[in-house]
Amino acid sequence: MIEDIKKRALHRTSILEGQMRGVARMIENEEYCMDIITQSRAIQRSLESLNRLLLENHLRTHVTHMFDAGGDERDKAVVELLKAFDFDSK
């Protein structure tokens, strides 16, 4: 894993952990539903941000090598990327 991306991804997972604990507390305290939903949506955006980092790392490392290798490796990379975006046909 690229060191800078790894550092940023770990930082985002720490933020997500805190956000999840906060939502759990809000539910436990029976806070206003719309406030909980707002926080839940913020978590979804944080997860998307994490996914973008992980995808960037995958593209810069594994996919690059797989395309360079060609053949079955290249085809495997394409299948993985389609799956990552829920475009796979399976």
Image (cartoon, rainbow, N blue to C red):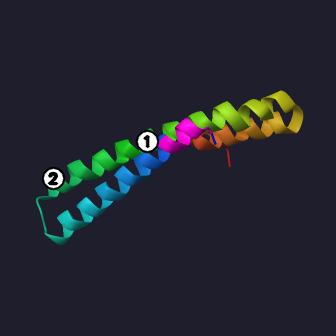
- Tell me residue 53's x, y (percent): 51, 38
* Mark sitting on residue 30: none
Crowdedness near tag 2: few (<14), some (14–19) or many (≥20) residues, C-alpha within 10 Å: few
Label 1: which residue?
48
* Label 1 element class: helix
Crowdedness near tag 1: few (<14), some (14–19) or many (≥20) residues, C-alpha within 10 Å: few
Q: Nearer the viewer, residue 90 or 75?
A: 75
Check the image and name the residue furthest to the left.
32
Magenta segment: does it hold 16? Answer: no
Q: Residue 70's quadrant in the figure?
A: top right
Distance Cα–Cα, label 2 vs label 1: 20 Å
- Tell me residue 69's x, y (percent): 86, 32
What's drawn in magenta, residue-wise?
Answer: 2-7
- Tell me residue 14's x, y (percent): 39, 53
Q: Residue 66's quadrant in the figure?
A: top right
- Which secondary structure type mostly characterizes the magenta part of the structure? helix
The quarter in which the N terminus is drawn is top right
* Label 2 element class: helix
Check disc 2 and give the amino acid type. Answer: Asp
Check the image and name the residue furthest to the right.
71
* Mark sitting on residue 35: 2
- Residue drawn at point x = 64 percent, y = 38 percent: 58
